Amino acid sequence: MEMRDASLGEIALVFLKLGTIAFGGPAAHLAMMEDEFVRRRKWITQAEFLDRIAAANLIPGPSSTEVAIFVGQLKRGWRGLIVAGACFIIPAALIVSAIAWAYVRFGALPKVEGVFFALKPAVVAIIVQALWKLGRGGVRTPLLAVIAVLAGALSFVGLSPLLVLVFAGALSAAALVARSRLLAVAVLPKVVAGAAAVAILTAAYPGRLLRLFLSFLKIGSVVFGSGYVLLAFLQSEFVHRLHWLTDKQLIDAVAVGQFTPGPVFTTGTFIGYLVAGWRGAAIATIAIFLPGFVLVAVSGPVIPWLRKSVLAAAALDGVVAGSLALMAVVTWQLGRVSIVDGTTLLIFGVSLIALLRFRVNPAWVIAAAGVLGWVLR
């Protein structure tokens, strides 16, 4: 079957539409894209679409956004890459920025506080659902289960999320090396040194806006697995290290990122606004998504090698297991500050049942919790 061509204008309009209506997280985004580009518009074959999903899962960053960037690149080269990614991100970033403005302006009102009071346990339920679904595929062997437990323990004792992931990937690769009687002594120290260099570089620069940019650039460059893993990095960087946010503000940012359409990574837009207003929102958005554009652009020759390399595949398996452990730790911590009485426990339980048993779209769960909070408070 011959695939149809697409102009830059068509690419822009379609991704602006998707960025405005794509509620429900990465899985929902990919389902909409498959319907739009494979079935309706015939821009890309089913096999090509699946290849792009696989490639997006092998590199850091928001997977659904990177699939959007891959589609744009396939149709119109580097121009399509930029147009598709930007048009998918911009609607969500604008919506989140407007909500952040309202949050700062009206967040202390009792009615608004009530909405977020009910949203928090619903968000925790959504994260638990994602952790359950991802865990079944990400922790497939006893070794990966052990790596996940060790990674969770290291996170609990205060090791940075980046180093936890480096440890998890290195341990998984080392286990393969031990089984195969190969040596990777020259490789693993370089990985650890590179991760340490990124962390030191970010910490060395003064200035709130520059630090905001470098923090989100680092986070966008290292987050594997899911947008939900982002939470561990946000908590470590902005709550514990910089003290720019409270746990309450972090869970509120997550709630906004869940309720709005588009990438979950626009949680960073909300945090950027809280830290430095409109300029902060723009800087955070650019910084957290920039690595995804670069990685998609340069990953073409690398992806086939990663697929063929048994050692690289083993390291990625470890990174996924470590990412799931980080998600579990953050879920526990956020649950402690969100589920505080019988009402929030009931909201959490009902939300989890709706998500797991009836497969309700997370956006509807968030909307229902917000309405309930408005009524109760």
Image: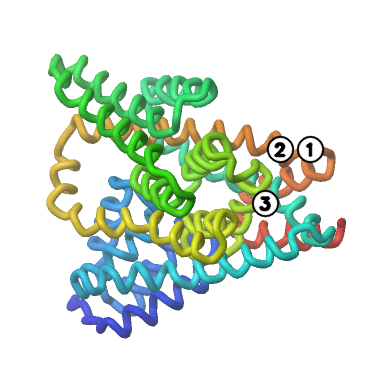
**Residue sitting at x 38%, y 74%:** 36
Whether residue 8 is visible, yes or no, is: yes
Q: Which of the marked residues, 3 or 1, is nearer the chain's N terminus?
A: 1
Binning the other alpha carbons within 10 Å of mark 2 as few (below 14), some (14 to 19) or many (20 upward) gives few
Residue 79: % across, % down: 23, 74
Front residue (pair 16, 309): 16
Residue 128: % across, % down: 59, 41
Instruction: Indicate the colouring scheme.
Output: rainbow
Binning the other alpha carbons within 10 Å of mark 3 as few (below 14), some (14 to 19) or many (20 upward) gives some
Mark 2 vs 1: CB contact within 8 A? yes
Disc 3 versus disc 1: distance between alpha carbons?
21 Å
Front residue (pair 259, 166): 166
| Secondary structure of residue under mark 3 | helix
Amino acid found under the numbered disc labelled 3:
Ala
Residue 302: % across, % down: 15, 47
Instruction: Please determine whether, in this image, residue 205 is positioned above or below residue 258.
Output: above
Relative side of 363 to 262, left or right: right
Q: Total number of numbered labels?
A: 3
| Secondary structure of residue under mark 1 | loop
Q: Which residue is under mark 2?
A: 337
Q: Which mark is residue 340?
A: 1
Q: Which of the marked residues, 3 or 2, is nearer the chain's N terminus?
A: 2
Q: Which residue is under mark 3?
A: 354
| Secondary structure of residue under mark 2 | helix
**Residue sitting at x 45%, y 20%:** 150
Dot in front, 3 or 2: 2
